[in-house]
Amino acid sequence: MSGRDSQGPADDALRAVKGMNDILPPDSAKWNYVEKRARATFENHGYREVRTPVVEYTPLFVRSIGDTTDVVEKEMYTFTDRDQRSLTLRPEGTAGAARAFLEHSVHVKEPVTRWYYSGPMFRHERAQKGRYRQFYQMGVEAYGVAEPTVDAEQIAMLMTLFGDLGITGLETAVNNVGGPADRPRFRDALVAYFTPRAGELCPDCQRRLTTNPLRILDCKVEGCKALVAGAPSILDFLSDGSRAHFDGLRRALDALDVRYVVEPRLVRGLDYYTGTVYEVRATGGELGSQNTLCGGGRYDAMVGELGGPATPAVGFAFGMERLVMTLPGDAEGFEIPADVFFAAHGEPARLYCLKRAAELRARGFRAELEHRAASMKAQLKRADRLKARVVVVVGESELSSQQVVLRDMKAGEQRSIPADDLVPELKKLLR
Ligand code: ATP
Ligand code: MG
């Protein structure tokens, strides 16, 4: 044991696992805002939520993501449970959704299925800004439609969401990576191109040259990137069917006024993609090379390869951490302050406020009260920190006269009102 590990378990008990983050208020307000907008946008487009477990049997990921991808080769959290079964913390959401789709024979119940999901994913990557070991994704999947208009609709849906969130300076790249019919010829062309240049490839890519040459196109090492720039383009190897699909995608994107660039060397990190692939990137901001917010595309072969009926499918996933980092505005600004803060003096007044606060909440107000015995000054200070719009002050004299003091925190003015008028008076003030 060395370094941090040698400090022993006592220290480990008090820190989060490397690459895994706590999300505290006020940051969580920003997260909630994004999630809420995303859910509304997805549901508005006919997507319904699916929730699947965060662990699956390991072969699901090996078979769907591909055993020569980075994710499967070196990033999965795989362990044997007490039943001696190999389990893996999900590194992404598409495989589990496809498994659930098949296991529940959803294709028998409806010709087209639109699902979205949201939750944590796990990859043992090098932790850095925008790249974590537990990270959150939201994503959508559409099963049963082969037509490229649904691909375009998903991309436009993303643009709508990101636009609504106030995110600007985005770049959308699209490509078509062909299907099983187009791949072998392209693969041969890649091998023919890279083999004489193998000495300039990184060790990983030298290996990929024999195991999975397409993966070289996704390498982030500078030397490899330079070689990739001159590599053959998949677009020259597409079958008529793939080409027509890609043209159809572009016509649909144009019809939806989506701006995009065609990047013939764009591939995604997971092997299951066929046909359409795309990425949405942030061009400004602090993310550096971790600027891909969202990745998506078709995986028409996955459901069939998992043992189900041939089912075309297309989806995307975006990373919440990167999206939240790109979202303009301070986290505090996303918090919703209390409408009303009750400041009570003495126990009878506190019991009265306890009841009135419950009544107001039932009517839809956001109400808080000070439970601790504290001076009026301290209570007002706390109301101020909580950014409460209105403070209701109740003491013994108010109780006996059935009045309450209403303090408008913005105007800094206060007045006594009959306790019975509290609701209408608050409505007026908060309007
Ligand atoms: P990258 O290019 O960053 O490696 P990827 O190709 O592995 O991403 P996908 O598996 O398609 O990406 O995941 C979709 C999105 O999920 C990414 O665009 C990113 O926003 C987010 N994401 C992926 N891996 C991580 C991670 N380790 N930490 C944080 N976010 C991530
Ligand atoms: Mg990755």
Image (tube, helix red, strand yellow):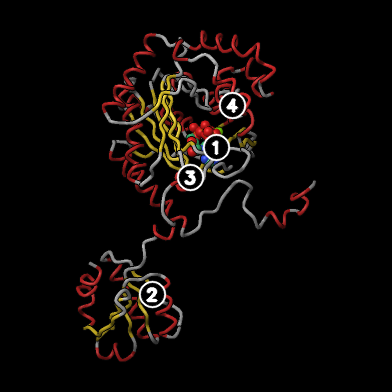
Identify the image quadrant of residue 108: top left
Give the residue number, with chain letter if any, for mark 2. 369
Going from N to C along the chain, the mark reached first, 2 or 4, is 4
Task: Say whether residue 223 is left or right of residue 384.
Answer: right
Which residue appears at 48% of the width and 19% of the height?
305
Q: Secondary structure at mark 3?
A: loop
> Given contact means CB atoms under 8 Å apart, are the residues at marks 3 and 4 in contact?
no
**Mark 3, residue position:** 285
Q: Nearer the viewer, mark 2 or mark 4?
A: 4
Could you say whether the residue bearing mark 1 is in a helix, strand or loop? Answer: loop
Q: Earlier in the sequence, mark 3 or mark 4?
A: 4
Residue at 46% x, 20% y: name it.
Answer: 264
> Few, some or many C-alpha atoms within 10 Å of disc 4 (few <14, some 14-19, many ≥20)?
some
According to the picture, the residue beneath numbered tag 4 turns out to be: 219
Q: State which mark lies toward you, 1 or 4.
A: 1
The crowding category of the residue bearing disc 1, from other C-alpha atoms within 10 Å (few below 14, some 14 to 19, many at least 20), is: few
* Closer to the camera in the image, 99 or 28: 28
Are dots 3 and 2 in contact, CB under 8 Å? no
Which residue lies at the image location 43% right of the left edge and 57% below the top edge? 330
Residue 400 numbered tag: none
The CA span between labels 3 and 4 is 23 Å
Q: N-terminal of the two: label 3 or label 2?
A: 3
Look at discs 3 and 4 and give the one toward the viewer.
3
**Residue designated by label 1:** 289
Q: Amino acid at mark 2?
A: Leu
Gap in Å between the C-alphas at discs 1 and 4?
12 Å
Q: Residue at x 25, y 84 (%)?
A: 415
**On screen, residue 231 above or below 48:** above
State the CA–CA distance, disc 2 to disc 4.
Answer: 56 Å
Q: Position of residue 153 (x, y in %)?
A: 31, 30
Near-viewer residue (225 or 122): 225
